[in-house]
Image (cartoon, rainbow, N blue to C red):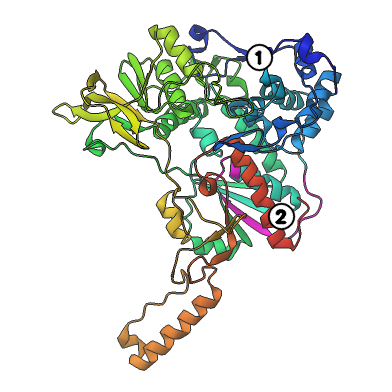
Amino acid sequence: MGKSTGFLDYKREEETMQAEQVRLKDFRESHMSLDVEQRRKQGARCMNCGVPFCQSTILLKGMTTGCPLHNLIPEWNDEIYRGHDRHALSRLLKTNNFPEFTGRVCPALCEKSCINGMDGEPVTIHDNERYLIERGFDHGWVKPMIPEVRSGKHVAVVGSGPAGLAVADQLNHRGHQVTVFERDDRVGGLLMYGIPNMKLEKNVILRRVRLMEEEGVVFRTGVNVGKDLTADQLLKSFDAVVLACGAKKPRSLSVKNADQVQGLYYAVDFLKSNTKSLLDKRDKYGASADVVSTKIHARTRGGEKADFNRPEEGSYISARDRHVVIVGGGDTGNDCLGTCIRQGAASVVQLEMMPEPPLSRLPSNPWPEWPRVKKTDYGQEEAIAVFGKDPRVYQTTVKDLHADGAGRLKEIVTVEVQFANGKLEEVKGTEQTLTCDLLLIAAGFIGCEDYVAHAFSLKRGSRGTAVTKEDGFLALTEAEKKPAVGELKLDPKEAGGKKQKLAQVEAVKGQADSESPVTKGSGASFGKVFAAGDMHRGQSLVVWAITEGRACAKEVDRCLMGYTNL
């Protein structure tokens, strides 16, 4: 333990953000870090508990508290306090492949179960984690670790989000040759295009990707497995395939003619268009991703000045001068809110179906349960600063859409809702009409996309996610699936008669049955195809995706080698 009275001597001091009117000028991160001496004091606040709930994942009343990665939090907090930052980083990296991601976007499940939080303020575990990894990069402590021996095994990872990157990182360090396939033009999955730049600077992702490339991981972008590359091609070329494609099938709006109105978009499409425009602009003018985070303006190749921290006008879904309504009160809805304000929206309303939470824990929600309390995030803070009020409207949803003669959305009808007998019901007589010409749906996801599941004949569960063997990641097939390879189409005239045709069909069918990794029968296993991350778990957090990726890599390694030391 560092300082035995640290939690009494020092108050919790979080990293602050720039004032709203300052950070709204662009799409850069706006965190203001503590100095080293202040960080030492925050490390000293860790009590080195006999039973550290922070690093022990617990499911209480259907919600998780504590770190899924089982980070060795008391150890590296103690090292921070003692000034042994490099040792602290080594302990952090032992359990977490990407602290630079979780240190920015994780909701800090660890802090919610910190024992200091029983009757005081928890340790700043989240900020301490980010401090360590950034200090490591700044001081050159994070270096490529190239495997000295290769196994000769080749693994394909489909999807480059946090789960896919974790699988690739683990298996590459084990000595397997890993190729990551990403359908988008840039690596990162939802890290790249689903989380806006002001929350996670994209140079942070590119820095990690470059490191992994130096270590031997191969990334192939613009390859849509299931369309550009078939499952058979992949299965014939690799010893194992890991599907980490996410759960990107969005939950739609249950409103008549919603798909026919102009001005309605899913949140991920909206966020992607903004970030892609921002990054394309930097590429267009030859700006370095490492430079733009600190310099708002830089000279282009033509000599003029350009703001590389704002997207290219006309190349993205814009909220400028529009009346925006966001359906969904979660993190994605908040990210849409912050993006719309930066784009210059005329007004923004955020609809949430659930009741407004209390400001502090209720007696029925004691520590260390996940705190069901109201949180005002950066987007809501910015809306309050710009529009003078909280944009959230609780227990309300969209009932109807009104469009003009050209099919463009002009207003929506909302209605209050309430839970009765376990069902969500409308409250009669509570309809209101709101001016709205941009409606963003951030209502979550309902599973993996159909074409990927069909390509690999995946069996899917009630949440629309890939079903795997119990307590594992080996994917299961759909019931009574026929072999996916070796199909032969014969012309009766060329086959030389009915008997010859049947004989050839049976021969090819038998060959397909023996060669195809797809096995007939309900719940049969591919034997070499695994599923991890949101595709397996369902829509979840980045920290859970990394956890799943690490666990899946261990199972893949055991499958390939007969044992594992991961």
Report whether 324 appears left or right of 379: left
Residue 14, numbered circle? 1
Q: Residue beneath label 2, please?
A: 176
Query: Observer-nearest residue: 35 or 300?
Result: 35
Q: Is residue 46 above or below residue 66?
A: above
Magenta-highlighted stretch: main secondary structure?
Answer: loop
Coordinates of residue 373 in the picture (x, y in percent): 52, 21
Q: Is residue 122 visible?
A: no
Kind of residue sitting beneath label 1: Glu
Query: Observer-nearest residue: 200 or 49?
Result: 49
Marks 2 and 1, how far apart at CA:
41 Å
Q: Which residues are magenta?
A: 146-163
Q: Please tell me whether residue 160 belongs to the stretch shown in magenta.
A: yes
Q: Residue at x 43, y 16 (%)?
A: 342
Looking at the image, the residue that sits furthest to the left is: 405
Kind of residue sitting beneath label 2: His
Coordinates of residue 211 in the picture (x, y in percent): 69, 37
Q: Is residue 14 visible?
A: yes
Q: Please tell me whether residue 153 belongs to the stretch shown in magenta.
A: yes
Report whether 363 appears left or right of 494: right
Quadrant where the N terminus sits is top right
Coordinates of residue 103 in the picture (x, y in percent): 65, 27
